[in-house]
């Protein structure tokens, strides 16, 4: 490359920059400025350096300038830049995630971690409980399957044996109704413990949902929900805990609900029972963690269990009803993703986690960080959500529809 210095009044440093910047171009750059004293100042402005760097600076040496800029930054500025990048990454993760940021940063369990562990899934005949049993079977756990529906449990056992290669003797079917007397619950716990000689994990998944306005919900429905969603679990945990303390370890895995974190319009009693369940087990954790008893309260939002086209039974104002809503919601978490995240929480001994998508996840953080704003939003969408449950249309998670109070 040739640069004619005799015709240019640019200083030597400028010419060095010209040579450096235009190195590698297809055509050499020659200075076109004249060298008369009268137009010395003008020639400096018209030379190739000034002309071409105005036209193509980013194409010529943008990477070099960026590197030089970083080198010239102070340590404090670099620290701020790193922090900004980190925060932007967290914002992106928050938008894309289906769980809280604490659980998102945890590791999945090694495949062999639960091998041989005794996992008692209470409420295993359908939905989340059945999916969790499948997930633990894939990890090689020994399973105790319980619910009120013995036939469904026997079918699940056959599926686990044939599909996942689990030995038939490593799956024990044990029917239970946790709303019965404490004596019956205690006897069932003894049978569960005797079968394998120990219990490592108990999954509390029994429960029922509710769709009814608060002023129309009968007292009988409220009492049934309290018994099934809360008091039954208290009885079961009380009976199990003596074995956990005697063997020196144990883990309560509680399937709660985001309704315990975010007040749920149209589900007032359900939300209250899940809040009580959450508080009870977290209080237990604060008492017994140092003695080897761990608690993980897992709060799911809506989960797609693969039966969206079939009506499910929930409590209405006077008793069980078939929920008319069969629409899929984009806010639902896939059940396989849910079970994997749940096992991640158990493996890391997370005290509490949220497994849900937006807008429920966003409302959870709003109510923690900006509670007044969160409650104001809930008051706006509450009537619309109750109307959706009453008519059986909508999903209950479409914010715009709830704000309009319409069912489109």
Image: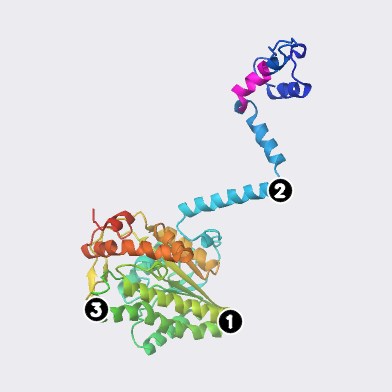
Q: Could you say where residue 208 lies in the image, as x and y percent from the top left? A: 32, 72
Question: Which residue sits at x=42%, y=68%?
Answer: 261
Question: Which residue sits at x=66%, y=50%?
Answer: 79
Q: Could you tell me how many numbered marks the image carries? A: 3
Q: Is residue 53 magenta?
A: yes
Helix, strand or loop at mark 2: helix
Q: Say which quarter of the image contains residue 317.
A: bottom left
Residue 75: which disc?
A: 2
Between disc 2 and disc 1, the foreground one is 2
Within 10 angstroms of label 2, few (less than 14), some, or many (20 or more) residues? few
* Residue 30 against residue 79 in the figure, above or below: above
46 left or right of 282 in image: right
Residue 218: which disc?
A: 3
Q: Residue furthest bottom?
A: 183
Q: Earlier in the sequence, mark 1 or mark 3?
A: 3
Callouts 2 and 3 close, C-beta under 8 Å: no
Mark 2–mark 3 Cα distance, whole angstroms, equals: 65 Å
Mark 1–mark 3 Cα distance, whole angstroms, equals: 42 Å
247 left or right of 402 in image: right
Q: Is residue 194 visible?
A: no
Residue 43: which disc?
A: none
Callouts 1 and 3 close, C-beta under 8 Å: no
Quadrant location of the N terminus in the rendered image: top right
Q: Say which quarter of the image contains residue 316.
A: bottom left
Helix, strand or loop at mark 1: helix
Mark 2–mark 1 Cα distance, whole angstroms, equals: 46 Å
Q: Could you say where residue 116 lies in the image, as x and y percent from the top left? A: 52, 70
* Residue 240 against residue 268 in the figure, above or below: below
Question: Which residue sits at x=46%, y=62%?
Answer: 365
Stretch of the chain drawn in magenta: 45-57
Residue under label 1: 291
């Amino acid at each position: 490359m040739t640069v004619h210095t005799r015709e240019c009044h640019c200083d030597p440093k400028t010419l060095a920059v010209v040579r450096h910047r235009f190195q590698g171009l297809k055509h050499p750059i020659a200075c076109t400025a004249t060298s008369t004293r009268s137009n010395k100042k003008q020639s400096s402005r018209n030379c190739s350096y000034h002309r071409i760097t105005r036209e193509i600076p980013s194409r010529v040496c943008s990477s070099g300038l960026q590197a030089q800029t970083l080198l010239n930054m102070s340590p404090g500025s670099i620290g701020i830049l790193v922090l900004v990048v980190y925060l932007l990454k967290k914002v992106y993760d928050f938008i894309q995630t289906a769980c809280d940021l604490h659980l998102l940063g945890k590791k999945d369990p090694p495949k062999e971690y639960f091998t041989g562990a005794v996992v008692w899934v209470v409420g295993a005949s359908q939905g989340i409980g059945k999916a969790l049993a499948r997930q633990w079977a894939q990890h090689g756990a020994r399973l105790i399957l319980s619910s009120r529906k013995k036939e469904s449990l026997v079918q699940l056992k056959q599926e686990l044996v044939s599909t996942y290669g689990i030995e038939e003797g490593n799956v024990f079917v044990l029917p239970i109704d946790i709303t019965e007397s404490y004596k019956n619950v205690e006897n069932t716990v003894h049978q569960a413990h005797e079968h394998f000689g120990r219990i490592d994990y108990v999954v509390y998944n029994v429960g029922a949902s509710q769709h009814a306005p608060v002023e129309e919900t009968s007292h009988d429905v409220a009492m049934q929900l309290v018994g099934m969603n809360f008091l039954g679990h208290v009885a079961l945990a009380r009976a199990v805990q003596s074995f956990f303390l005697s063997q020196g370890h144990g883990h309560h895995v509680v399937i709660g609900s985001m309704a315990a974190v975010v007040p749920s319009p149209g589900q007032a009693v359900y939300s209250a029972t899940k809040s009580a369940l959450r508080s009870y087990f977290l209080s237990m954790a604060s008492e017994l963690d140092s003695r080897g008893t761990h608690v993980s309260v897992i709060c799911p939002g809506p989960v797609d269990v693969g039966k969206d086209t079939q009506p499910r039974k929930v409590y209405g104002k006077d008793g069980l009803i078939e929920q008319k809503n069969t629409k899929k919601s984009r806010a639902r978490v896939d059940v396989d993703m849910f079970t994997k995240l749940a096992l991640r929480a158990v493996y890391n001994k997370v005290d509490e986690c949220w497994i849900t998508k937006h807008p429920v996840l966003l409302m959870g953080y709003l109510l923690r960080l900006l509670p007044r704003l969160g409650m104001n939003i809930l008051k706006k969408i509450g009537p619309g959500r109750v109307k959706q449950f009453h008519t059986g249309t909508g999903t209950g998670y479409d914010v715009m529809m709830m704000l309009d109070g319409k069912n489109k």
